[in-house]
Amino acid sequence: MNTATTTDNNAVRKHAVRKELFVDGYEVVIGIEIHCQLNTESKIFSSAPTDFGHEPNSQASIVDLGLPGVLPVLNAGVVDRALKFGIGVNAELGLFNTFDRKNYFYPDLPKGYQITQMANPIVGEGYIDVIVNEGEKNEYPKRMGITRAHLEEDAGKSVHDAVDGMTGVDLNRAGTPLIEIVSEPDMRSAHEALAYIKAIHQLVTWLGISDAVMAEGSFRCDCNVSVRKPGAELGTRTELKNLNSFRFIERAINREIERQIDIIEDGGKVIQATMLYDPERDETRTMRTKEDANDYRYFPDPDLLPVRIEQHTVDSIKAAMPELPVARRARFEEALGLSEYDARILTGSRQLADYFEDVVAEVGQQDAKMAANWVMGDLLGALNKDDKDIIDSPISAKQLAGMLERIKDDTLSGKLAKKVFSALYEREGGNDDDAADKIIEEKGLKQETDTGAIKAIVEEVIAKNQPMVEEYRGGKEKAFNGLVGQVMKASRGSANPQQVNQILKELLG
Amino acid sequence: MSELHLLSTQQLIMGLQDKQFSSLELTEHYIKRIDALDSKINSFITHTSETARAQAQAADEMRAQGDKRRLLGVPMAHKDIFCTQGVLTTCGSKMLHNFVSPYNATIVSNIDKAGMISLGKLNMDEFAMGSDNSSSYYGTVQNPWDLERVPGGSSGGSAAAVAAGFIPVATGSDTGGSIRQPASFCGLTGIKPTYGRVSRFGMIAYASSLDQAGSMGRSAKDCAYLLQPMIGHDPRDATSIKHDMPDYVQDLNDAEAAAGDKPFDGLRIGVAKEYFSKGLDAEVEQSVRAALKKYEELGATIVEVNITDPDITLATYYMLAPAEASSNLSRFDGVRFGYRCENPTDLIDLYTRSRSEGFGPEVQRRILTGTYALSAGYFDAYYTKAQKIRRLIVKDFEDAFANCDVIASPTAPTAAYKLAEDLDPATMYLGDVYTIAVNLAGLPALSQPVGLTSEGLPVGLQLIGQYWQESKLLATAHLFQQHTDHHLQHSTIAKETV
């Protein structure tokens, strides 16, 4: 399987200057660091669980607490996940990677140092292809460079409101495995930054290596923003810390761009600093400047041996890689004949794409479009309304396919199918694959296609609705629809509409 | 019963097996001695007499029921660097004066499982930093041979307690010579195994890449007995290595059985002129040379080898060890456990005062040295350079071992010295000059007594082996001890009866 995230048609030249993105004549330069939590069951260096949302300090072992004498042992699960990511972004893999200590004092950092990868990261240079303003008229593709990605442990957190006048420390998060993904400064607007972040977010969830829930902090972004006059040296950058929603990222970057341009236009200088975005006031604020920066005194962690990865390990991970979003979308368009729009929606997540393909596997590729319509229309509509994900779908792919089969063999009309769908969604058919058939049987929703039976109903309707018949014969086309409606009503919706039309026309002459 | 504490571990085991005495009697004997005499030498920080009695009673019952573990019911004690569940673990520091570990170090569990009785926690240089036990928050330890002298460090409490006849064997740890040098000063045998042989989990880290736990006793065989349950791969320590599991005691018995008049026939002992350099006390040199002569008489061949200049090695060690220590000791910050200063005004005050008040001067000195060595702008000049020299040291040992089986040297340049208030730290560091290269290379080494100075102070001979050859080292000492009686000399305190 081709694991490249790109096809040639959307690979584009790096650093293309897009003048239309300039803000007041300034070019914006953005680089992004993403901290993404890897979804191992236990922590990166201990066997404590990584679940979110438990009592403070209930998920921290003696290793996470940094008690005297304890030692870290690397969780092999994080290595596999990082390699998957590296392959997913076409990167050079660090087959020899090492762990370093980053030393600083903070109450939520139990050991007084964070174990991270400074000198030899597990993922080297790579890239990801994204579509900026996707789905909009002004969308365009762009290749974003990735400098490196490395493994590290998360710190705990300080809790300022639990004890009056005191600060508590919760170490449940301490030792949670993270992969820090560092981009090249390739982004030229908030939209480009957002497109990149969304692409990485989609990739890590697609690969199944992270839950990437921004609200839980398992996917956090720091954006380095600077502005410059076109052609000038890179401007002084500021770092927007811990942005944890797509909406805020865009707003925060734009506020920061405006702030920096204002400073320069007023003849001032941007000071290198760490900034926080306050969504309530929609402004960025300085948290600390470079002057208070730490000397982290990085050095190789003597408690952890270097990780040497064999080529066969990489080969087996490569062989087990899922088809990536870009490739899958292209295949949906080419092999299944879906529109670009449909293919994009259906590859929105790996679970959705898998669901759709499961349906297609049942009904056949020739009916992929019908399957797409039902999945995207009725199913996603219903799920959205209930704020549910495709994995929570009450209708299994096989059940939906079962219903589609009944549409194909004319057992169901479109209208009846909607009724069956609703019943399936309410789980009235149970768990079995043939739930649709059960519902059709129990509710008597079979479409009437017996010409004789339909004819009898039509005759009855004509007899009972003479005024309407007269109207029709008098030239009122609308009355015909009324009669069709009466027939459908009399058949309780089960009559095949095409046959009703045809027979009614015949009998009315 | 007054002579029980002068018996070897093997004699104790046989006495227990033959019901000459019970484990409880043995334990009581040692407790009585400790209670009566430890005030003279200050070797224990924590006593666990009550649990020891209960353990001994249980051991006697298990032995009566047919439990055949060979160390069952044999007393010992741990250097206070090893975490012991439910028992104070101070690492010789005010910083941990109130720290009761919630877990056992791997070696503590292993020794428990072997059925040994722990009599308590032994004094040591603060965080294992020191060569004379003067840096302990719990006070210096007196040498049982001469109470005015130091026992050596950092496992000074372990050495003194064994030499005083308070316990037959003790655990120690060795970062730059901390088992071998006090063994030398106290007339004991002490072994520092190959790095990775013994788990470091639960041993409070000083310099992670150099620290290794080992055993101390009055003879090589005593050391072998205690080392046995300590070794083995530990999944909780990533630097612990899976390797073959020899039976050290059996290996010594086999070596003894195979030995003829010339037990060292074919053994090439490497001697490096760098280890007989300036600063070496004449009497120490004399005893060491005499021991080498004895080895030759017993069949060994002496060959000359070259070793990295000890001055360079010393400088390398005192760059790398503090660098690692500065980071390892960051966790002692007054936030979660241990000492916290009174009424901190803010976070920075909490950190600085807790650390300034909790750490002693030697520890602070090394933290500052290490912080400096790792800081931006100096890292390459100091840390990186030291790592390069470390590789050269490893290479020099490899070359030397191409021509010999073990390397012999004095363990320390002098015998035990008198505690001097104004001892310059750099002078104290020189005491490690012959031992530290072994730690930088991760090799196994031991020290054994080879004579007494004119003042009646023990002199140690260091034997350095190739990786994983603890058995060979122990045998090289054991067979020597079969033909000599240096290891049977007793300290002043050991000779006292209570």
Image: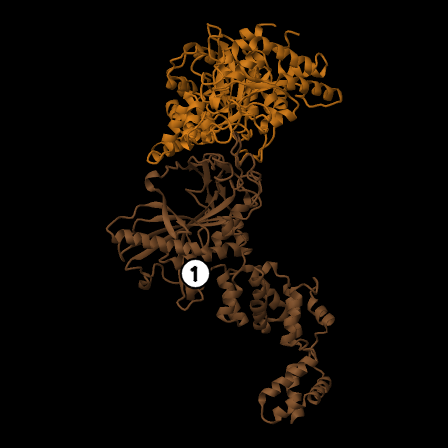
Chain colours: A brown, B orange
The percent position of residue A488, horizontal first and vertical second, equals: 67, 81
Left of A382 or right of it: where is A492? right
A442, above or below A127, in the image: below
The quarter of the image holding the C terminus of chain A is: bottom right
A23, above or below B17, in the image: below
Amino acid found under the numbered disc labelled 1: Val
The percent position of residue B419, horizontal first and vertical second, equals: 43, 11
The residue at 37%/51% (across/down) is A283
The residue at 68%/16% (across/down) is B23
Q: Which residue is mark 1?
A: A130
The residue at 40%/59% (across/down) is A191
Residue B306 visible, this angle: no
The residue at 58%/89% (across/down) is A477
Q: Nearer the viewer, residue B109 or A156?
A: A156
Q: Residues within 10 Å of mark 1 (few under 14, many from 20)?
A: many
- Give the chain of mark 1: A
What is the quadrant of residue A54 in the picture? Answer: top right
Left of B6 or right of it: where is A265? left
What is the quadrant of residue B201 in the picture? Answer: top right
How many numbered marks does the figure carry?
Answer: 1
Q: Secondary structure at mark 1?
A: strand
Residue B196 visible, this angle: yes
The percent position of residue B112, horizontal first and vertical second, equals: 64, 25
For this orientation, the residue located farthest to the left is A267
The percent position of residue B293, horizontal first and vertical second, equals: 49, 13
B47, above or below A127, in the image: above
What is the quadrant of residue B69 in the picture? Answer: top right
For this orientation, the residue located farthest to the front is A467
